[in-house]
Image: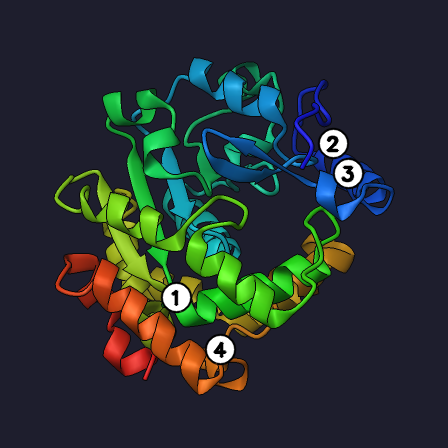
Amino acid sequence: MSSSSGEAGANPNPAEMPARLASRLRRARDTRDEDKLYRHRGVLYPLLMCPPENLSALEDVTARKDDVLLVAYPKCGFNWMVGLLKKILTQATGRTIETITPPLIEFFGADVAQVLDEMSSPRLLGTHMHPDNIPASFYANKTKMLVIFRNPKDTLVSFYHFCNSNPVLPSQKSWDAFYGNFLSGEVPWGSYFDHALAWEQKMADPNVMIVTYEQLKQDLAKGVRHISSFVDAELSDAQVQLVSDGSTFAAMKESSQTSRGGMGNIFFRKGEVGDWRNHFTEEQSRTMDREFHKRLAGTRLGRLLDYERHCH
């Protein structure tokens, strides 16, 4: 795996990002799979999207109290939640919330601090990073952090397909190999269980709210109400319904065909709960069950994920 630098340079304002993403996709096609990831502080990251200088530059970022930071382990519903939060904030403020697409701060570039300083409030930002690696100012300035998790079996399936359809990530040689890498944490952004256990330690923080993909699929309007209250965006019942109707997974996938062009189907695949049953062998399912019970059973986050219901 390479340790060389990836793309850096110009500030990624929203108008420039589609062209920059297209450039990275073109570079990805000329990059060997073994050179697409590198290791930073023991965790794998995609070189073309967040090279080492990006991660180093995050140390200089200054968070604002009225920021909203969306956090998710990869393929837990991040892109769905971006669209939902933009709708909530737009309804609450009466103006369109401008974001960089995707709003992952580790993708912004070596000039991330300047880029963020130039953005107007409220800023909707995002990250896939482990909570211990999020810039300290987000904690010091009591920024609201909305964290979304998904059951690990469906997360693994979605991550597998995402790697095989996204050229900036290495193609997976086999389902069995990716399954083993996921359990050992040898995937981009590291171990699902390490992320979950770290957020478990922060659940009592009033500036942290954890929601699950499955809860939102079951009752999206209820989720919109809770999330709106958390980010201090009080909405009327009519506004809650408007946001909910426009934020179903199917609606987001359809709109992504315009907003993300050919990448829409990569970021929004099936959106189903229980698709893992089409991929896992019985032994793989039992192994994941053992890992979940060893790492998360009895925790608040483990109960929130309702593993028995969604993974058996």
- Give the residue pinned by disc 1: 152
Q: Which mark is residue 24?
A: 3
Total marks in image: 4
Snapshot quadrant of residue 164: bottom right
Q: 219 above or below 24?
A: below
Residue assigned mark 2: 16
Q: Which residue is mark 4?
A: 272
Marks 4 and 3, how far apart at CA: 29 Å
Q: Earlier in the sequence, mark 4 or mark 3?
A: 3
**Above or below, 122 relative to 197:** above
Residue 149 visible in the snapshot: yes
Classify residue 298 as left or right of residue 220: left
Q: Earlier in the sequence, mark 2 or mark 4?
A: 2
Q: Earlier in the sequence, mark 4 or mark 1?
A: 1
| Secondary structure at numbered mark 1 | helix
Three-letter amino acid code at disc 2? Glu
Asked which quadrant contains residue 218, the reply is bottom left
Q: Residues within 10 Å of mark 3 (few under 14, many from 20)?
A: some
Distance from Cα at disc 2 to Cα at disc 1: 35 Å
**Label 4 to label 1: alpha-carbon separation:** 13 Å
196 vs 245, left or right, is: left
Q: State the CA–CA distance, disc 1 to disc 3.
A: 29 Å
Q: Nearer the viewer, residue 303 or 232?
A: 303
